[in-house]
């Protein structure tokens, strides 16, 4: 058996399932029930199928051991509890090893609608189901492997943007219309409806480099969403694209202007626009949001 120490070994902790209180389980139950009512007509069918396959239900917080038994058999992935948010290298290493980090705490009942730091509902309910889908799981694995190159080029912010616009807030085209698949949407009571039902946001066909150049805002609904055709296409782009030239361009060339970056509010030449949003939700906040963009 290998004794190699990984960058994340000291970060992994026990889920502590036996330590959850009745209030903790009741909070999961409340979150689960109301979110599933929102998602059923709006989320991609792969997500709903995965929920069933992994045995997710209301009632009690799922036990990681039970979830992992099913998940490993399907795609080789597992969920591990970690000590809060983790840095880029251990995060990429975990994904490369097919381990998805999750907080083990759950929000209080007075924070049902929004929590600044991701909790077990966001991580487990939002992220884990689609890791049972082979193409999605393969994309996440390639994303982790790509992290080493991004670290070498010092362009992790661009890779983080790709994660934001796909894994967290991505939409997918289906025969009956757009559906959500991003974990930030699947776990958000308000944004799961806003992204499709409210006409404010732009819907733009997914483009790898466009996403990696587009800055993000983390504390409000998004001004735009990028739409993939399929998980297979997302995986193919991750595997068949040489990121090195893009990483070089992101860094810019010494003596020249800073590499081009885009604001999430605007449409640009070359965008394949599926829906031009009104931006009505964003307009009153735009000046503040422009000063608050995170990456």
Image (cartoon, helix red, strand yellow):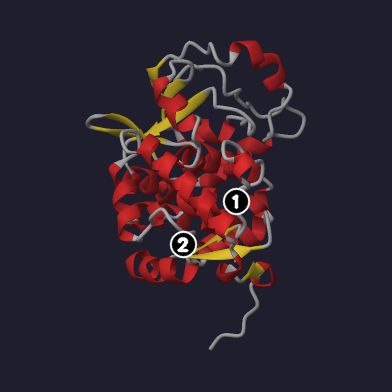
Say which residue appears at 28% left-offset and 43% top-offset. Answer: 45
Image x and y of residue 280, in percent: 53, 11
Residue sitting nearer the eye, 259 or 230: 230
Say which residue appears at 30% left-offset and 59% top-offset. Answer: 53
The disc at residue 195 is none
Image x and y of residue 256, in percent: 73, 27
Is 207 above or below relative to 19? Answer: above
Say which residue appears at 74% left-offset and 22% top-offset. Answer: 291
Kindly identify which residue carries mark 2: 62
Q: Which of pointers 1 and 2 indicates the residue nearer the eye?
A: 2
Kindly identify which residue carries mark 1: 119
Residue 212 placement, left or right of 219: left
Does label 1 or label 2 sit earlier along the sequence? 2
Q: Secondary structure at mark 1?
A: loop
Q: Residue furthest left?
A: 175
Q: Residue furthest bottom?
A: 1
**Which of the 4 quarters of the picture holds residue 152?**
bottom right
């Amino acid at each position: 058996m290998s004794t190699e120490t990984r960058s994340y070994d000291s970060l992994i902790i026990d889920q502590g399932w036996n330590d959850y209180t009745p209030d903790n389980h009741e909070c999961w139950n409340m979150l689960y029930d109301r979110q599933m009512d929102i998602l059923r007509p709006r989320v991609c069918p792969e997500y709903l199928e995965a929920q069933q396959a992994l045995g997710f239900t209301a009632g009690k917080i799922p036990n990681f051991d039970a979830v992992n038994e099913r998940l490993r058999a399907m795609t080789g992935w597992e969920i591990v509890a970690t000590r809060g948010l983790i840095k880029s290298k251990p995060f990429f290493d975990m994904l490369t090893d097919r381990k998805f980090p999750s907080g083990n705490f759950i929000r209080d009942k007075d924070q049902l609608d929004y929590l600044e730091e991701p909790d077990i509902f966001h991580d487990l309910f939002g992220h884990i189901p689609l890791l049972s889908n082979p193409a999605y799981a393969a994309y996440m694995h390639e994303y982790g492997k790509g992290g080493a190159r991004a670290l070498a080029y010092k362009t992790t912010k661009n890779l983080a943007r790709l994660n934001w616009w796909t894994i967290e807030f991505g939409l997918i085209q289906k025969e009956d219309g757009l559906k959500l698949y991003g974990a930030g949407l699947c776990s958000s009571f308000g944004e799961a409806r806003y992204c499709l039902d409210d006409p404010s946001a732009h819907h733009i066909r997914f483009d790898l480099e466009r996403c990696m150049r587009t800055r993000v805002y983390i504390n409000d609904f998004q001004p735009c969403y990028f739409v993939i055709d399929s998980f297979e296409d997302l995986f193919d782009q991750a595997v068949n694209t040489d990121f090195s030239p893009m990483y070089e361009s992101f860094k810019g060339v010494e003596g020249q202007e800073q590499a081009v970056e885009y604001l999430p509010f605007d449409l640009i030449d070359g965008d394949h626009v599926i829906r031009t949003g009104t931006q009505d939700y964003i307009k009153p906040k735009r000046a503040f949001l422009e000063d608050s963009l995170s990456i």
